[in-house]
Amino acid sequence: MNFEVNAIFQIAGIGIIIAMIHTVLKQMGKEDMAHWVTVIGFVVVLFMVVRLLDNLLQEIKTIFLFQ
């Protein structure tokens, strides 16, 4: 249970940092870089979520003995 809470806080932290970087770059007039930072942040979070879903499905498999 503790791991899932940490993962949620990590994803939220990444989102906040990416939003701040995006805002700063947009204010500086570098909108292309701001969009790239957002896309890269999205991909990182997507990989984290996929890894968490894989762990969840592995746990479901072990519970129902589908090995």
Image (cartoon, grey):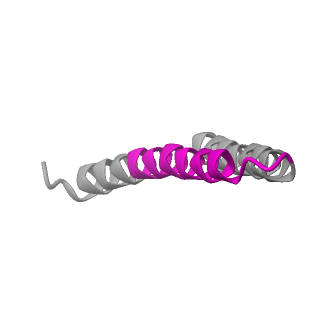
Q: Residue at x 87, y 52 (%)?
A: 27
User: Is residue 7 magenta-colored?
Assistant: no
Image location of residue 31, percent across then percent down? 70, 53
Report the span colored magenta.
28-52
Does residue 16 appear to the left or right of 62 in the view shown?
Answer: right
State the count of labels: 0
Image location of residue 14, percent across then percent down? 69, 44
Does residue 33 appear to the left or right of 53 in the view shown?
Answer: right
Q: Residue at x 29, y 48 (%)?
A: 58
Magenta span main SS: helix
Does residue 52 appear to the left or right of 42 in the view shown?
Answer: left
Using the image as rendered, state which of residue 16 and residue 60 is in the foreground: 16
User: Is residue 40 magenta-colored?
Assistant: yes
The residue at the far left in this view is 67
Using the image as rendered, state which of residue 20 and residue 66 is in the foreground: 20
Q: Residue at x 23, y 59 (%)?
A: 64
Image location of residue 50, percent across then percent down? 40, 51
